[in-house]
Amino acid sequence: MDEAPANEMSFLDHLEDLRWHLIRATAAILITGTLAFIFKDFVFGIILGPKYLDFPTYRFLCKAATFIGVNTNFCGDELPFMIQNRTMAGQFSAHIWTSITAGLVVSFPYVIYEFWKFISPGLYDNERKNARGFIIISSLLFFLGVLFGYYVVSPLSINFLGTYQVADIVENQIDLGSYIGLVRASVLASGLIFELPIIIYFLTKVGLVTPEFLKKYRKYALVLVLILSAIITPPDIASQIIVSIPVLILYQVSIYISKVVIRNQQKKENANV
């Protein structure tokens, strides 16, 4: 028989414990964010990468388009727009918030570790053992999502929106905050979307989701995925399809994970009868 959580804590004790977990997680973000602030040339070199057409994604798409004989704007040296700053504190503010975002991304495994340390005392021994790889898997999925957002969503969005014109007389002069905001939103949104299997795992554990439920509403999930893809990508069909494919794969993986969780719970119930 599984042992229940050992330490009983009052509500105020839980709040105090949560406060220290949040303090340590915040400290990790600030420390890594400070390092990102110091090495700004490296960080902004990464962020400004999709501005130039020698970016790996553009080179791949340029070669693919050339191979099949299709005209494309993925080939060249630089996208035809200028990034500018129009406020006194604009560059400094962009530097600060970009450093904090970089700190969050880099320290994500430790933030998840602090979250796990907070919830794990309330789990049974077998639940802790079954979720032993939670930190590694969730961090891996998050970083895969970040890479997908940076190498797929960001360049597609920047290339489309940066070259789009309603008239030749209207030039694109993109504000620094707008550019960084697009990259940040693409990266963080993709990172969180890739956490779908982890979310489904916990929702299944608490009984809010079943494999049958996920299968029944699969067609609605498809529509939701397409809407979500339209939000985080430029409004062209090719980009939306590229983004929606991995999300749909993650949804199918989530169904399988939900099946495994339900099967393990049923085996446990049968063993206890």
Image (cartoon, helix red, strand yellow):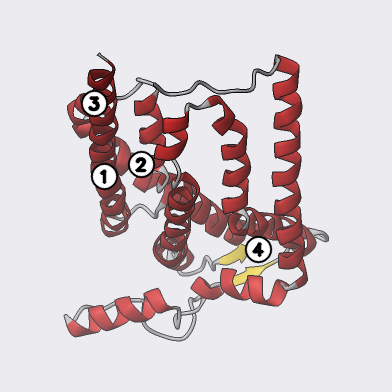
Answer few, some or many: residues within 10 Å of disc 3's Cα (few below 14, many 20 plus, some between 14 and 19). few
State how far apart marks 1 and 2 are (Cα): 7 Å
State how far apart marks 1 and 3 are (Cα): 21 Å
First in sequence: mark 1 vs mark 2: 2
User: Residue beneath label 2, please?
Assistant: 197
User: Residue beneath label 3, please?
Assistant: 267
First in sequence: mark 1 vs mark 3: 1
Q: Tags 1 and 2 in contact by the CB under 8 Å rule?
A: yes
Q: Nearer the viewer, mark 2 or mark 4?
A: 2
User: Residue beneath label 4, please?
Assistant: 176
First in sequence: mark 4 vs mark 1: 4
> Residue 227 versus residue 215: which sits nearer the camera?
215
First in sequence: mark 3 vs mark 2: 2
| Secondary structure state at the residue bearing disc 1 | helix
User: Residue beneath label 1, please?
Assistant: 253
Amino acid type at mark 1 = Val
Residue 42 rendering spot, x and y as whole percentages: 65, 76
Amino acid type at mark 3 = Lys
Answer few, some or many: residues within 10 Å of disc 2's Cα (few below 14, many 20 plus, some between 14 and 19). many
First in sequence: mark 4 vs mark 3: 4
Residue 257 rendering spot, x and y as whole percentages: 28, 39
